[in-house]
Amino acid sequence: MFHVKPRIVAVANQKGGVGKTTTAINLGAALAAYEHETLLVDLDPQANCTSGVGCKPDGGDPTSYQVLTGAGSIAQASRPTGFPHLRIVPSTADLAGAEVELVGMMGREFRLRDALDGDGIEGYRFILVDCPPSLGLLTVNALAAADALIVPIQCEYFALEGLSDLMQTVEQVRRFLNPSLALDGILLTMYDERTNLALQVAEEVRSVFGNDVFKTVVPRNVRLAEAPSFGRPIHAYALRSRGSQAYLQAGREYLERLGGAHGA
Ligand code: ATP
Ligand code: MG
């Protein structure tokens, strides 16, 4: 058994509803299915990642809010999901307050990074951080802590709109906070192969981002939309669905892309 540092990956895009949470849960679950210890960190006050893996924190439980404000460690806030190799640091609506409270705190951009430097991350191969749909302090904390980001893009009109804002933020983060932040990939989501539009969007994204785009494309699949209401990753809800197969494939592709120390 050898020890490697976990790869910390922010799943980010300030555009709402593009598949960040669905990707964090199901790419995370795919990596876990390949027996890589994986930790999800819900950094969104909407807490969709939390409920999507069936986690319901009680009032007193430490969550990502305590982690960011320094009142709790990752070790204290992380818990099992009920799915093998997959744990989560949950969030609650309280986290919305952290965005405001952090503004006055020292090292406000490095709260998550510092927490992920401490106890409780030994043994993980992947830490996937589900970001909220904004470029505020929560997302900046994720980008400052991360080795890399994965950007889900919905195959719809305006898919590329706003992406330049995200890339500008990434550049700023690289310049001032985290020089080694990498782009691990852009994942096309909610792809509807019956429409020319999806095809066009996919082609456009590939022409701009080239090999940074995952070859695997996640289709629009109703099972993916249903699974969170059962508190399950797609593989534990509808293994044979196209959505499940796509995220398993994306997980495989990701491991192959990383190769070396993080390979399968
Ligand atoms: P937010 O910006 O609000 O955090 P998000 O980027 O995390 O949103 P999701 O919550 O993952 O996006 O997805 C938005 C909606 O689309 C959800 O209802 C989700 O279940 C659904 N969805 C995501 N991916 C797919 C897919 N491939 N096929 C069908 N539905 C999907
Ligand atoms: Mg989300």
Image (cartoon, rainbow, N blue to C red):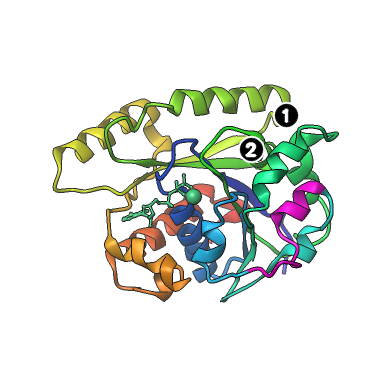
Instruction: Please report the residue visible at 53 percent of the width from the left and 71 percent of the height from the top.
Output: 54
Are the residues tagged 2 and 1 within 8 Å (C-beta)? yes
Q: Horizontal and vertical percent for residue 222?
A: 28, 62
Q: Categorize mark 1 by other alpha carbons within 10 Å: few (<14), some (14-19), many (20+).
A: some
Q: Is residue 212 visible?
A: yes
Any atom of ligand 1 within 8 Å of the CB at mark 2? no
Q: Give the range drawn in magenta.
A: 57-69
Badge 2 element: helix
Counting other residues with Cα less than 10 Å from the Cα at mark 2, is it few (<14), some (14-19), or many (20 or more)?
many
Position of residue 192 measured from the top left corner of the image (x, y, whole percent): 21, 48
> Secondary structure beneath disc 1?
loop
Question: Does the Cβ of the disc 1 residue fall within 8 Å of ligand 1?
Answer: no
* Residue at screen point 68% across, 54% down: 6
Q: Which of marks 2 and 1 is nearer the N terminus?
A: 2
Say if the magenta span includes residue 60.
yes
Query: What percent of the width, then of the height, locates residue 241?
Result: 29, 68
Q: What kind of residue is marked 1?
A: Leu
Task: Specify whether residue 110 is painted magenta.
Answer: no
Position of residue 61 measured from the top left corner of the image (x, y, whole percent): 74, 67
User: Which label is found at residue 143?
Assistant: 2
Horizontal side of 73 relative to 219 (left or right) equals: right
Q: Quadrant of residue 39?
A: bottom right
Q: Name the residue under label 1.
A: 177
- In the picture, measured across the screen, residue 98 lies left or right of residue 204, that is right
Quadrant in which the N terminus is drawn:
bottom right
Amino acid, disc 2: Leu
Q: Determine whether 63 is above or below 176 in the image.
A: below
